Amino acid sequence: MEQPGFSRGLLVLFFAFLFWQSASLQPVRKGLPQITDKYAVRGATVIQSPGDTLRDALILIDDGMIHYVGKDKEVDGAIYAVKADSMFVYAGFIDAFSHTGLKKQEQGNERERIDDPGNPTNEQAGIQPGRSVLDMVDPGSRAISDLRQLGFTISHVFPEGRMLPGQGSLLLLAGDQTDHMLFRQDISVYARFQGVRRAYPGTVIGVMAKFREIFRNAENALAHRRIFAEEEGIERPAYDRSLLAFLPVVSNEKPVYFEAPDLKSVHRALALQKELGFQLVLANVKQAWSADSKITDANARVVLSLDIPDEKEEKKQEKEVSEEETPEPGWSKNELDALKKKRSESLAKYLEEPARLARAGMQFSFSTDGVKAKEIMTNLRKMVKNGLDEGEVLAALTTHPAQLLGISKWAGTVETGKMANLVILDAPFLEEDAQVRYVFVDGDLYAYEAKKKKSASKKGDMARVNGAWTYTVDVPGDTRAGVFTINGEPGKFTGVIATGNSEETDLENIEYADGTLNFEFSTEVEGTDVRIKVALEFDGDAYTGRMNVGPFGSFPMEGSRKSPENKL
Amino acid sequence: MKHMLFFMCLFFLSGIELLAQPDPGNLLIRNGTVLTITDGIRANTDILVENGKIKRIGKNLRAPQGYQTIDATGMHVMPGIIDAHSHIAIDAVNEATNPVTAEVFVGDALDPFDISIYRALAGGVTISHAMHGSANAIGGQCETIKHHWGVWDPQGLVMEGAPRTIKFALGENPMRVHGEGYNKMPRTRMGVEQVIREAFEEGKRYQAEWDAYDRKRMTNAKTVAPAFDLRKQTMADILNGEIIIHCHSYRADEILMLLDVLEDYGVDKICFQHVNEGFKIAPELAAYGAHASVFSDWWAYKFEVYYSTAYNATILTRNGVVTSINSDSGELIRHLYHEAAKTQKYGGLTDDEALALITINPAIQLGIQDRVGSIEVGKDADIAIFNDHPLSIYAIPQKTIVDGIVRFDIDSDPADMRMDVDPEEELPAFMLTDRHDHESCMKDVEMIYGLNELLFNHKH
C-alpha cells in the first residue's frame, strides 16, 4: 500500500537533488506538476509541544493542514511519504519580530534638506504608523529562504523606518507572491526611539514627547468621531493617517511593538506604557535586568533578540592577555586588567540573560532581526550553555510566539487541526550537527540535502582568501565602496585597500583562519590618524563583517570576489 | 573556561543577593567637623542618619544595631554639593530642530550608566540639574537628579518631588542654530524676544481654549475637545507658576529684556544661567527676585562672553542675588569646591558665603532647599566628607553619601567603576568617546554644524 507513494517520493527527491546543484533549496513541487498535497511523515520522534514527545509517530498532512498525529492509522490513496525514521519533528518556528524579506530600499531621503525642520511632514519625520509592510516584501528574497531553511515558517514582519515605521503583518515563509504568504495583515504597530536627521523629532526626547502627543490626540480623535457619528452640527474629525492608525492602539485592539534593544529603551517604553496605558511588546530585547517587576506590572510581553554578543570576542580576549607585556601607552596593566574583567563580566551577564528571564517566569519569544541566519542556531545553543532550558528555547520558537501573536489556534504545536508548519531534523534541533532535512510551510514541502561535514584542507582554505575583493561599507547616510587585495599565506599575508578615490593603503596585521579574515589599516579622518580594524567572515566568494573605525563606531561591511573580467 | 563560567555565576548570584536587600540608608558619622551651612560649624559632632534622612546632630550619639559607623575624626563634613547646571547622565541634550521645544523633557533620556555620575560623586556632588541644551530659545524641560550611582533603572536617579524646571536660551546659540542654520527666526536678539513672547501668547491662548472647553462640557458632554499640544501646555504651565525657568544668558541687555518679558506675563520663577554680565545689573536682578548661576572664571569662548569678571559671583552675592557656581561640564563638576574657593581670592567671600554657592543656593534655585543644601535634622542625608576644609586646595573628598547610602568611598574605588559595559568593546578605545568636558551645552547639534565646528567652538 505504501509502495507507490514511496517510489514517487524517490523521484521527487531526485529532482530535489538536481535543483540542489543550482540553488541550494527549492520546494519539492516547484516546477513540477503537483503530485499530491497529501503527505505522510513516518517513523519520526514528534515533539508535539515543549515536553510532549511522541516516538515512532505518523503525521498525516492534507491540503495544508495536519490531519492526524499518532501511532498508527491506515493510509490510502495517492500520498507522498516522507521517510523520517530517526528524525525529529517540531512545530514550525515562529519569528516574533523581524524585517525579513524587505526589498532593498534606495537610500532614504536622509540627505534631503527640510526647509522647516520644526514642522516636517509625517513622512519626513518618520511618522507613518499606518504603513503596511506588504508592498515592501520581496517573496523571492534570500532572507526568506534562509530563515525557512532553519525551520522558521512564520515571520512577524515590519517595515523599516524611524519613529513609527508602520505595521507588522504575519507572513508564511513560502510563496511566490506576497498575497500568498500573507497570514495576518497589519496586526501591530511598530515604534522606535529613533529620531530623524535634521528634523523634528530628532532625538529620543523629541520622540518621547511626540509619542505622547500622538497618543493623546488619538484619544481625542476617538471621542471626536464618536460625537460626530451621534450628533448634528459637529465639525468633521481630522483625517490624519497617523492618527487613524493609532486609534486601534488607543482602544487596545493592537499592541505596540517598541524596539528596545538596551535597558534604557526598555525602561523608556515601560514609562510611556505606564503613563498612557497601551498593550506593550518589548522587541529585540538584549538586556532586561532591573526591569522584571515593571515588565510584569505593565503586562508587557518580551521578544528577545537572537543577536547576542559574539564568542569570537572571547578568542580576542585571550589574545590580548598574551599581549599584556606591552600594554597600550597611557594605560597601566591594572587599568587594562580591570577593563577586561568588566567586559567579561558584562559578556557573561548578556549570555545569561535569557536563562535569567526564564527563571523569573518570563514567557519570551525570539526576534530574528539583526542576526545572521547562520548564527541563529549557534546563538540558541549558547543560551542553553548559559543555563536556558532546552524546552524554553523550543517554547520561545513555537508556543510562546503563537500565543503572543494570537495564532495558537493554528500554529505553534504539532496537533491535529493545526496548519501544516513543521520542521524535520536528523537530530534534536539544538544538537551541534543537527541538520534540517524537511520543512513544511502551510503544507508545502521543502527538502534539504544533508550537508557533508567540513573537511576543507587548510591549504585550500588559505588560498581562498587570496585575490581582489570588492567592498561596500554602510556609514550613516552614505555607502562607501572600493576594493582590497590579499596575497600570501598565513604569517606572510600582504594586502592593500583602495578607497573610492583609488588611494591605496597597506594593510597590516592580516590574519586568516577558518573563514575569518582580520586586518587593520590607518587613515586620516578630520586631520587625525584613525586606526581601522576590519573583521570579515567568508562564505564562498562573498563575505560580510564589520569595519571598526575607533571612536566613530563600527559599520557593516560586505562584498564579494572581484571577477577577473573586471580586472583592469 | 568552565571554571571561569562557574566563578562568574558565583559572582552574579552574590550580586543578586545583595540587590535583594536594599540598603535602608542607616548610618552614624562620628566626630567630624560639621559645616552645616545654615547653622555654623560644629566641632567634634556626630550625625545620625535613619532611612536616608538626618535624624540627629549632636555629640556622643549612639548608633542602633546594624547601623554603619563612619569615623570622621579630623575630617570635614558638609552637605552634598549641588550643581545647578550640568548635562551629565542624559542621552539627549538638544532637540535642536525648532526654536521652541518646551514639550521635550531630558528626564525621558536619563542615563544611569554615565560614568560622569560617579566622577561627580568623587567630587562630593550629590545632586545635579540635568539640563536641556541652549540651541533653542525655549529648550526642553530639565530634571533634578540624585547621584544614585549603581541603580539600573533610569527612574532611580530622579529626585522625586523636585519642582519642574525648563531651559530658555538667549543670544548667539539660538540665533546661530535657527537663524544661520535654518534661515528661520530668531536671527537676531530681537527675534529671540519675539519667539519667547509668541510662545507665551500661544500658551495663554491654549489655556483659554481648554478652559472654554471645560466650561462648555459642564452643560454638554458631547463637546469636542481642542487638539492636544504638549508644547503649548508646557508654556501654560510656566504661566501658571508650575515651572522654574533656567535661562542661558550672557549679556546684561538681553537679561533685562527677559525680565521685561517675564514681568509682562507675570512669571517670577527665574534663574539666569552663566549670566556673565550679571555684575552690571545685580541690583536689578535682586529687585526682581531673579537668581544667578555662574562660572567662577570661565569666559571668552565666543564673542558675547568677552565682558566677564571673576568677581561676578561676589558682586551678585553682595547685592543680594541668590547665586550659585555651576559646572556645565563633566570635568568641572568634579571640583566645584575649588570653583567656590576662587570667590575667596576674587572678592573675599566668607567661608559660609562661598560654600553656599555650591550647596543651599543652588538648592534654592532648584526649589529643593527644604530637603537638601544644608545639614539639618529632617533633611535628606546627602553628605560629603573631606579630609580637610573643602575650600582648602588640599581637600580631597573621602566619602560621598546620597540619601544615607555611601555612593563614593575613596577607600573602595576600583579601577573600572562602569556599570553597563559593551561586551564587545575594543579596549581601551572607549575613553575616546566618553569625554564630557566643554561641549555638552550644544550636544546633539552636530548634525547641523558638523563635527569640526563642534570640536573647535565652545558653545555654552
Image (tube, coloured by chain):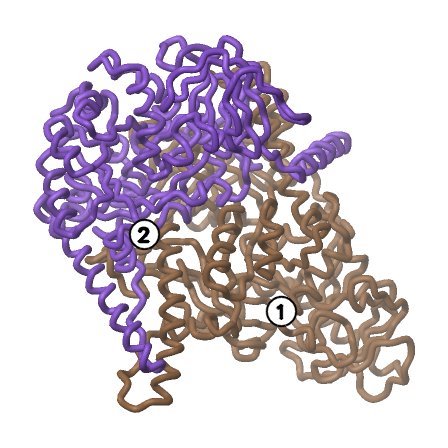
Quadrant assignment, res A29: bottom right
Which quadrant of the rendered structure holds the N terminus of chain A? bottom right
**Which numbered circle lies on residue A197?**
2
Which quadrant of the rendered structure holds the C terminus of chain A? top left
For the residue pair B297 and B278, the one nearer the viewer reads as B278
Residue B76 in the image, given as x and y percentages of width and height? 45, 14
Give me the chain letter of mark 1: A
Identify the chain drawn in purple.
B
Q: Residues within 10 Å of mark 1 (few under 14, many from 20)?
A: many
Where disc 2 sits, the SS reads: loop
Residue A299 in the image, given as x and y percentages of width and height? 60, 61
For the residue pair B246 and A94, the one nearer the viewer reads as B246
A53 sits left or right of A147 in the view: right
Q: Amino acid at mark 2?
A: Arg
B182 up-or-down from B431: above or below: below
Q: Which residue is mark 1?
A: A154
